Image (cartoon, rainbow, N blue to C red):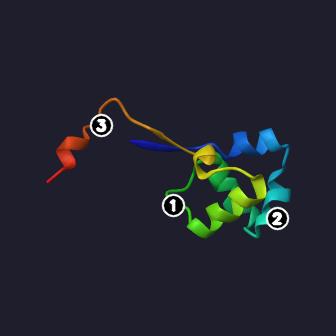
Amino acid sequence: MAIILRLDRVMADRKMSLNELSERVGVANVNLSKLKTGKVSAIRFSTLNAICRVLKCQPGDILEYAEDDGDDISAEDP
């Protein structure tokens, strides 16, 4: 399974730069850059909330679930 970050797409749709989003959200530019490029393994709900508020979007606009071909969820069930 993979979670794909689509922050770059939403920002482009809103014509918002990384610097502007960083200022409006109150999160360091470097941290938003990592989110934008998908180089993170977690995101705080408070950060996600602030991003969605500023970009006027839903979390599902930024986060996407993609199932890998080899994933077998039933193997993880007790």
What residue appears at the point 62 percent right and 61 percent down from the top-left corner?
Answer: 48
Q: Residue furthest top?
A: 69
Q: Which residue is mark 1?
A: 42
Q: Position of residue 29 (x, y in %)?
A: 76, 62
Left or right: residue 34 versus residue 65 is right
Q: CA distance from mark 2 to mark 3?
A: 38 Å
Quadrant of the rendering where the N terminus is positioned: top left
Q: Secondary structure at mark 1?
A: loop
Left or right: residue 14 versus residue 69 is right
Label 3 near label 1: C-beta < 8 Å? no
Q: Which mark is residue 64?
A: none
Q: Earlier in the sequence, mark 2 or mark 1?
A: 2
Q: Secondary structure at mark 2?
A: helix
Q: Position of residue 3 (x, y in %)?
A: 48, 45
Marks counted in the figure total 3
- In front of the other: 38 or 12: 12
What residue appears at the point 37 percent right and 34 percent down from the top-left corner?
Answer: 68
- In front of the other: 77 or 1: 77
* Amino acid on which disc 2 is placed: Arg
Which quarter of the figure has residue 2?
Answer: top left
Left or right: residue 24 versus residue 65 is right
Q: Position of residue 62 (x, y in %)?
A: 62, 47
Q: Which mark is residue 24?
A: 2
Q: Which residue is mark 3?
A: 71
What residue appears at the point 51 percent right and 60 percent down from the top-left corner?
Answer: 42
Q: Secondary structure at mark 3?
A: loop
